[in-house]
Amino acid sequence: MLNSIHVAVGVIINARDEVLVAYRPKNKDQGGLWEFPGGKKEKDKDKHISDTAIREIKEETGIDIQHEELI
């Protein structure tokens, strides 16, 4: 059986319909590419995948999520 890694990302859209994306540093895995903020689900921290997205977005950007919906 293959090990799997669950990840969650957020598509953050502001009041002007601008979408937040981040540029990965060139010295990181997949460096030089664009990405949405997010990360790996941690079984000891996150009950739901949405918890992962909210936690990771806060850690990476400092943004507190006010509204969420799955897409």
Image (spheres, rainbow, N blue to C red):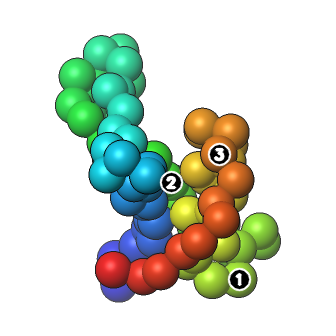
Extreme front residue here? 16
Res 63 label: 3
User: What's the residue type where badge 2 is placed?
Assistant: Gly
Q: Quadrant of residue 52?
A: bottom right
In the picture of the structure, the residue carrying the numbered disc 2 is: 39
Q: Residues within 10 Å of mark 1 (few under 14, many from 20)?
A: few
- Residue 52 visible: no
Real-space Cα separation, disc 3 to disc 1, in angstroms: 20 Å
Real-space Cα separation, disc 3 to disc 2, in angstroms: 15 Å
Q: Nearer the viewer, mark 3 or mark 1?
A: 3
The answer to which of 60 and 29 lies nearer the viewer is 60
Extreme left residue here? 33
Secondary structure of residue under mark 1: loop
Q: Is residue 39 left or right of residue 62?
A: left
Closer to the N terminus: mark 3 or mark 2? Answer: 2
Extreme right residue here? 44
User: What's the residue type where badge 3 is placed?
Assistant: Ile
Task: Work out which quarter of the rendered image holds the N terminus and state it.
Answer: bottom left
Q: Residues within 10 Å of mark 3 (few under 14, many from 20)?
A: few
- Residue 59 visible: yes
Q: Nearer the viewer, mark 3 or mark 2?
A: 3
Closer to the N terminus: mark 3 or mark 1? Answer: 1
In the picture of the structure, the residue carrying the numbered disc 1 is: 47
Q: Is residue 32 left or right of residue 43?
A: left
- Percent position (x, y) of residue 33? 21, 31
Please say if the residues under marks 2 and 1 sit with CB atoms less than 8 Å apart: no
